[in-house]
Image: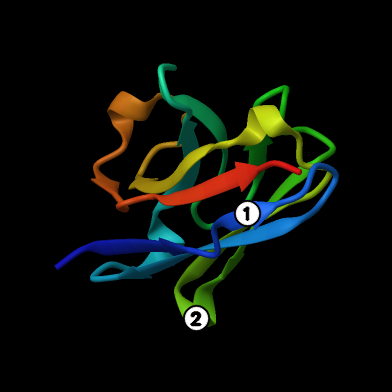
Amino acid sequence: QVQLVESGGGLVQPGGSLRLSCATSGFTLDYYAIGWFRQAPGKEREGVGYISKIKGWTYYSDFAKDRFTISRDNSKNTVYLQMSGLKPEDTAVYYCAATNMATMSADEYDYWGQGTQVTVSS
């Protein structure tokens, strides 16, 4: 059974950092790209970035470049989203998802986690 479970969300002050984890099971992580998405209240879901299968190349949306980093630990079947320089507008539920493509299109992702809340506020 394929599962993705996010963790690490919480309340952080503006300018702070947070590391989200996406623990996977039921499939070989190296054979899937893992994407991170977020959805703020009243807004559409948007892509944060992804890490490709095999080579582990990364892609980031413009707002995530220079502040967010995606990495993968195959030995732990876990993908991470390291976020720094957080802003109030980064407040959202963050999701990880798996696909066998290199894409930021949410429709191409087959498996999704339940999400973890990130709140950036003073």
How busy is the neighbourhood of tag 1: few (under 14 within 10 Å), some, or many (20 plus)? Answer: some
Residue at 36% x, 28% y: name it: 106
Residue at 67% x, 42% y: name it: 120
Q: Is residue 75 above or below residue 102?
A: below
Residue at 50% x, 81% y: name it: 76
Q: Is residue 102 visible?
A: yes
- Look at the image and tell me in which quarter the N terminus lies: bottom left
In the rendered image, residue 9, in percent from the top left (x then y), is placed at 54, 58
Q: Is residue 55 visible?
A: no
Q: Is 21 on the left-hand or right-hand side of 41? A: right
In the rendered image, residue 57, in percent from the top left (x then y), is placed at 65, 47
Which residue is most to the top? 43
Which residue is most to the bottom? 75
- Look at the image and tell me in which quarter the C terminus lies: top right
Colour mapping used in the image = rainbow
Which residue is most to the front? 122
Residue holding disc 2 = 76
Q: Could you say which quadrant of the image residue 88 lies in?
A: top right
Q: Could you say which quadrant of the image residue 119 lies in?
A: top right
Q: Is 25 on the left-hand or right-hand side of 70? A: left
Three-letter residue code for mark 1:
Leu
In the rendered image, residue 49, in percent from the top left (x then y), is placed at 59, 37
How busy is the neighbourhood of tag 2: few (under 14 within 10 Å), some, or many (20 plus)? Answer: few
Three-letter residue code for mark 2:
Lys
**Mark positioned earlier in the residue sequence (2 or 1):** 1
Residue holding disc 1 = 11
